[in-house]
Amino acid sequence: MYFVSINDVKTGMTVGQDVFTSSADAALLTKGQQLTERFIERMKEHGLPGVYIYDADHPTPLVLNNQPIISPQLKQEGLSAIEHMFDAIENSTSAEAVKVIRHLDGVVDNLINSLSYNQGVLINIDDIKSYDDYTYHHSMSVSILSIAIGIALGIPRSKLNKLGQCAVLHDIGKIFVPIEIINKPGKLTAAEFQEIKKHPLHGYAYVKEHNIGSPDVGEIICNHHEKIDGAGYPRGLKGRDIHLYSRIISVADVYDALTSQRPYRTPSPPSEALEFIMGGCGTAFDYEVVNAFVAKVELYPVGSYVLLSNNEKARVLSNHKSRPVVEIADSGNIIDMYRNPQYLNVVIKCGEHA
Ligand SMILES: [Fe+2]
């Protein structure tokens, strides 16, 4: 499967994955459909940059579109809007802050458009991260991951905006926790941890007081640290008593936190973070949400390094789930682990950050 630009698509080509537009829940083109002049015209009318085309020799996406799933421009726009939001809540009048929060609607909508359009593409966590400020990039990543899970779960386009918004807002309650606790590089004391644990309630109180979003937005934010088995906080809710969007945000939140560089620990590789999430199925996390998430993220992101069971170190060149194409670090040989007979017994021992 290859991404072909709109200028190069030709009639008779077979669509490799569904194509969505920003205005409808249904696909404009569906996987397996043959392109006609009319379809190509409609893609141009919707301003689509191109389409994934099926290739019988490479039925799985051996070589993917090199462009990140979220463009650098959109990422920057989102980060600025989120930074502006945190700043407004902290330093502006309530009315001004509420105006800024409502402006996030447009940003979330653009994220949904990008993710809907690229919905067959696995998410490389390194593509969506920024390393300059944890709070802003974390809010942004959690929103992107939550929307991606929502799409995988089949949540209709018209409802994704609320999910994305709640994900952006999930940690706003941290603004009301003393900054020296939030930024403490070392281990928290029991008393400090109790303060941190109040942030979902602070967030709930803020959105309720300022009437932000629909009535359940406060509840969704409040429940993002609840666990399926009732061991979470602040209320110890169980199973489906926890709003679906909170269960989604919870998975996105933990995955992004584990794969992030923090002052007190190095980031886990995506494969390890996924192991952790899968290990928490049924206790911390919802089974269906985790399933949807696992289907959406890259196990060994393109560009990351892996250690093979024959002790060779290699760089990942394609994102086939468990058997990618890799470049062996010492020899420079390109190996397709899915097809190369000499590597059929070799497995990936562990992933490493690039
Ligand atoms: Fe949180």
Image: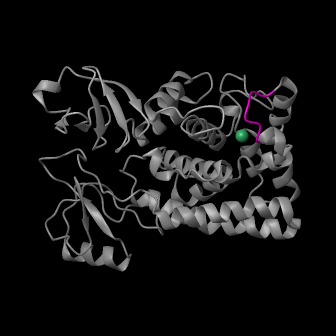
Q: Residue 315: x, y in percent?
A: 30, 38
* 264 lies above or below 190: below
Percent coordinates x, y for residue 206 in the rendering: 85, 53
Residue 8 shown left or right of residue 148 in the figure: left
Towards the viewer: 66 or 33:
66
Report the residue that reaches farthest toward the front: 330
Q: Relative to residue 302, is residue 165 drawn left or right?
A: right
Q: Residue at x 65, y 37 (%)?
A: 263
Q: Is residue 156 left or right of residue 11?
A: right
- Mostly what secondary structure, the magenta segment? loop
| Position of residue 330 measured from the top left corner of the image (x, y, whole percent) | 23, 33
Q: Give x and y (percent) for residue 170.
A: 71, 47
Determine the residue positioned at 74% across, 57% down.
214
Look at the image and give the residue range highlighted in magenta: 183-188
Does the magenta run of residues contain 245? no
The residue that appears at 33% across and 70% down in the rendered structure is: 49
Give the side of residue 63 with respect to residue 141, left or right: left
273 or 304, which lies in front? Answer: 304
The quadrant of the image that shows the C terminus is top left
Q: Is residue 211 visible?
A: no
Name the colouring of the figure. Answer: one colour
Number of numbered tags placed on the structure image = 0
Pick whichever, 196 or 163, lies toward us. 196
- Is residue 40 visible to the viewer in this orientation of the structure? yes
Which of the 4 image quarters holds residue 181? top right
Residue depicted at x 86% and y 47%: 176
In this view of the protein, which residue sits in the foreground, 161 or 265? 265
Q: Quadrant of ligand 1?
A: top right
State whether residue 17 is above or below residue 297.
Answer: below
Indicate yes or no whether the magenta region holds residue 187: yes
Q: Quadrant of residue 260?
A: top right
